[in-house]
Amino acid sequence: MLRALLGKGEFRFRLFRYYYAIFLLLILTPTIVASVLVHTYVVGLIEREVDKSSSILIGQSASDTDKLVDELQGDMIGMLDYPGLERYVRAREELDRMAVNEIMTGLFNRLQALDDHALAGYAFLFFPESGLVVDSFNGHFDQSMFFQYTNRFVEDERVALRELYNGRQMMTMSAPMEIDHVQLLSRTLLGSGEYIYAVVSYPFNAAVPSAYLTVAIDTAKLQRQIAIDSEPSISTAVMNASGDLLAYAGTRPLGGERLHEALLSGGGAAQSVAAEGRRYNISYDQSSRYQWTYVAIANMNQLRQPVATLRTGSVAFVLFMLLAGAIASYYLSRRVYTPIRGIAEELAVGPQTDGELQASKDTEFARIRRRSSLLVREHKSMQALISGTAPVVHEHFLGKLLSGELKDELAVAYYGKEIGLDARSAGPLAVLCVEFNWLPVTASWTETDRSFHLTELKNEIGKELEVWFCRLREDQLACIVHLADDASTGPQTAASVLVRQLQRHTAFYHAAIGVGGAVGGAWQLHVSCRQAQQLLRRRRLVSGVDLCVDAADWEERSPVDSFLPAAKVGQLLEWYRAGQYERMLEDVERLLDEKIPSDAPAEEVRLLCVDVLNTWLRAMAADSQADYGIEHSATLYRQVQACATREELKQLFRRTCGELAAAETEQPPERFAGVLQQIREHYGSDLTIEQFARELNMSVGHFSRSFKEAVGEKYMDVVLRCRLDAAKRLLSESDLKLDEIAGRVGYLSRNSFIKAFRKQEGITPGKYREQTS
């Protein structure tokens, strides 16, 4: 129907839905929420008021009822104080008939006085020893006459009566009992009723009483007493400790068992119970003197009738608002659609792409959005491309400045502005070059891990200094610091900030900082960078962070000869041939500790250590038992360059010396035990001799010779034997095909496996299986 009203066009209907959704969100939804909140508040208010009023009313009713029962108890105790009763109990056998009749008449009159109580139905006095009953209606006669003829009970209630008239009782209440009243002589049924027996024994403290005064509380009177006439929606009841209902006023939707269950489950607190499709709030008030509980049952459905009326009105209001919103949305969508259609028609006049021609059936807004989206996508892709390449371009530009390729002030200012790096390019600047020596703890780090670590370091430095960064080498980072115009922040001040930040991470590397001088602009950065790198070449072998500031003290440092004398080289060769490796190591350590000054440049000390290693490697090359390849030698040279302290150089020489001693003293069988174990466990894999030679730092030829000397077999013979032994086990113990067995024992094809098996065993695998089966 809405489409028919709006006319043709999906876009018109979308506009209508858009405005209608706004109406729902901004107007109708708050209205619904407010209605729900009001409904919830009213319901909660009614429930709270019901709980409050129920508690007040039931409390008042309970207080009034307890007062009446207290009055009844007082009247019963006053009646038992009659002197004639005490006289009759003590000397009943001694009294003559006239005296007995006089006492009975007095008792009868006093029992009739009890009948006038607001709750009493009738009263009687029961003497269990003599079986005599004095009734307020018929006088006195035998108990069998009273309990069987004038007052008839059911059998279960007779049992309850026997328990009631046993032992001391003080205002003990029975459960409600149905009692039929019969005329003594005519046996005519005078009426029936439900009564609660209230019993007081006499004497009061006697364990075996002589008499029991009983007042039958009429439940109808008790019901009228507890009824709340002003609140027809609230029913009341009185319930004893066993859950028996003593009286019930009003409608009766809940039985005594349900009320007692709710009392026990809630611990006496108010409860909400559903029954017969209705909900009831139950309040309890425990009598302070008697073993019963007053109950108020409020019919919440009846009390919530105003809420239902309010809910109906709210629904009607919401429906009206829905209709009003539909009309307003229709009007607004028509107003907005007209200019959009005009814009779409104007855009359609220009050239169209193939995609637009195929989508000519789209809505006007879709065509406008397609054209604008194309422009936005092109802009975003260009922006993303520029943003992604900006850091690379900046670093490339800074690298050209630091290398001296760009020195012209105008060119630097122009290019810096083009790439967005013109800020502070003309102010005082200084280059601080940081050289890193990564510690062994970072050996497992990838290049990405180190880049992340350096990025974190850059961020920490950037928080304290205005700085640009440029990676000169893998282990060298240039920090281009912007200095203050008033000279309050000089190169050394900036260097102290770098020292503090670098010292926080000395667990991962040793570092040296070369501090370049201040220059007047970015076009002179190459001068400061060259000064910083020259200072780095004079760094010392110290742990932590070494700050290289001034070159004035270079001339005062003692020179270090970077090459060993010929006599020392010959001495090292003699010690090696004699197997005196410890002496060789002691000589190197003494050289590092005593003969090289503590302020010697690290570069010169490393060159001297490289010459020592060259001497050792020449000695090893001359020994056929120790074969160190070019790859291992290059590794040693790289390790020397990575050492930043004297202690690291000592540890490197100790490891190298240990390898020399191990190559000489290690027993060949033990040396190749791991190789044999891998062959036995992985004979089915591609086991190459080059792999094991590389693991043992040997050339392939040296490994092959040493293996045969240690094991007694060639390497390939051992591999072939392990493979064929496994193949024979599979042939005799399984039904696998030859192709599967060949693949499991390390052969690429069935033919190569058969050929090797026949050459070694003299028969084919198939015949071997036949012989062993």
Image (tube, rainbow, N blue to C red):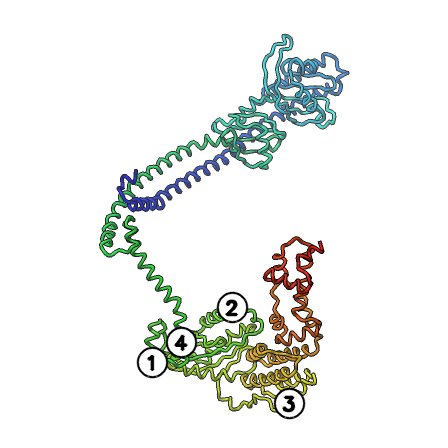
Alpha carbon distance from label 3 to label 2: 45 Å
Q: What is the x, y in percent for residue 323?
A: 31, 38
- Front: mark 3 or 4: 3
Q: Earlier in the sequence, mark 1 or mark 2?
A: 1
Q: Could you say which disc has been placed on residue 409 in the image?
A: 1
Three-letter residue code for mark 3 = Gly
Alpha carbon distance from label 4 to label 1: 14 Å
Alpha carbon distance from label 3 to label 4: 50 Å
**Which residue does the image show at 58% across and 83% down from the upper left?**
610
Q: What is the x, y in percent for residue 733?
A: 69, 54
Alpha carbon distance from label 1 to label 2: 38 Å
Q: Give residue 382's quadrant in the image.
A: bottom left
Three-letter residue code for mark 1 = Glu
* Residue highlighted by disc 2: 449
Q: Secondary structure at mark 1?
A: helix
* Residue highlighted by disc 3: 570
* Residue highlighted by disc 4: 398
**Which residue does the image show at 34% across and 37% down from the upper left?**
319
Q: What is the x, y in percent for residue 334?
A: 25, 45
Three-letter residue code for mark 4 = Leu
Q: Are marks 3 and 4 in contact (CB under 8 Å)?
A: no
Q: Are marks 1 and 2 in contact (CB under 8 Å)?
A: no
Alpha carbon distance from label 3 to label 1: 58 Å
